Amino acid sequence: MSELTEQQKLQRIQLDADTREVMSTPTGRRFVNHAVELCHIMKLSFSGNSQTFFLEGERNIGIQLYADINRACPELWDEMRAEDRDRKQQIMQRLENKKGSTNG
């Protein structure tokens, strides 16, 4: 890989600062998590037809987001994913509670 120019280094520094700023709040982490989930980075994109190209494009954007976050603030990726798991568990619990109260 070639060396970064001075301008590219400054742009990378700014991007990393912006990434840390967005990821520093629960709201920012929820938004980024939603965007990453839309990109299906943890799913197989092969479809057996031309849809694969579209899915790979989505996935590529998600992988780039992951790389930016992992470079700038990797600990916040883990925090974001943990918050998402907790949020989904709370939703499931509420649904179960609602289901139980309507059957009662």
Image (cartoon, grey):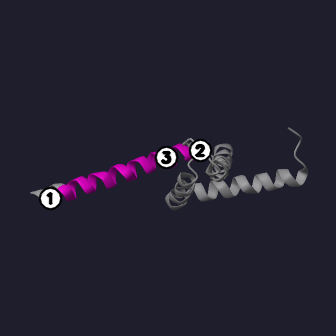
Rendered residue at 41%/47% (across/down)? 85
Measured as percent of width and height from the top left, residue 5 is found at: 90, 49
Looking at the rendering, the stretch of residues picked out in magenta corresponds to 76-99
Write down the quadrant of residue 82 in the picture.
top left
Q: How many marks?
A: 3
Front in this rendered view, residue 25 or 103: 103
The stretch drawn in magenta includes residue 80: yes
Pointer 1 with pointer 3, Cβ within 8 A? no
Q: Secondary structure at mark 1?
A: helix
Q: Earlier in the sequence, mark 1 or mark 3?
A: 3
Measured as percent of width and height from the top left, residue 10 is found at: 83, 54
Which disc is residue 45 wearing?
Answer: 2
Image quarter in which the C terminus is found: bottom left
The stretch drawn in magenta includes residue 78: yes
Q: CA distance from mark 1 to mark 3?
A: 30 Å
Q: CA distance from mark 3 to mark 2?
A: 21 Å
Q: Main secondary structure of the magenta part?
A: helix
